[in-house]
Amino acid sequence: MSELRADTITASNGTGPVTLTKQSAAKAFVSFGGTGTISSNKSLNISSLTDNGTGDYTTNISSAMDSADYIVQTSARDISGGTNLVMASPNYSRTFTASVSNVWTAFAGASSKTLHDASQIEKTIHGDLA
């Protein structure tokens, strides 16, 4: 088996870092249950979760992003066998920072978008780390 270790990889001209094009990876993600006491099922670069109330959650990012201008993708579902359609969205009514972002979940299709604790929530963050 081979092993490659490096502290710095520079461009072939030796003057700068390698430019990665056509490559991207999520800088953070989390999958968690949104009912009862919330807990992560699987995560990367997420230090903690906070339940702010029905359908309102905060995720704290371990290694901060370079600014609050990153992309958040969310999804939610009820896996308890119910027929409720649930939607998820970044909650921009709360302040996003380089290390904190929020998501809310609600019944889909309802005219008033009633907040709802979804049984499964997924969140992915793309952007540049600090």
Image (cartoon, rainbow, N blue to C red):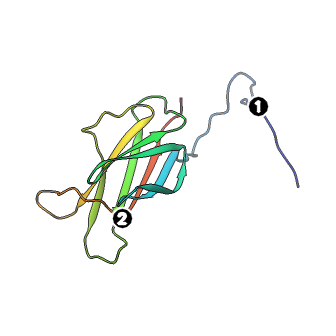
Q: Secondary structure at mark 2?
A: loop
**Occupied quadrant, residue 96:** top left
Tag of residue 119: 2
Left or right: where 14 falls relative to 94: right
Q: Residue 84 in the image: x percent, y percent?
A: 25, 71
Q: Residue at 45% x, 50% y: name it.
A: 124
- What crowding class fits label 2: few (fewer than 14 Cα within 10 Å), some (14-19), or many (20 or more)? some
The amino acid sitting under disc 2 is Ser
Rendered position, 35 above or below 22: below
Distance, label 1 to label 2, CA atoms, is: 42 Å
Q: Earlier in the sequence, mark 1 or mark 2?
A: 1
The amino acid sitting under disc 1 is Asp
Residue at the far right in the pictured view: 1
Rendered position, 67 above or below 43: above
In this rendered view, identify the residue nearer to me: 106 or 39.
Answer: 39
- What crowding class fits label 1: few (fewer than 14 Cα within 10 Å), some (14-19), or many (20 or more)? few
Location of mark 1 (residue): 7
Rendered position, 49 above or below 8: below
Which quadrant would the N terminus be assigned to in this image?
A: bottom right
Nearer the observer: mark 1 or 2; the answer is: 2
Q: Secondary structure at mark 1?
A: loop
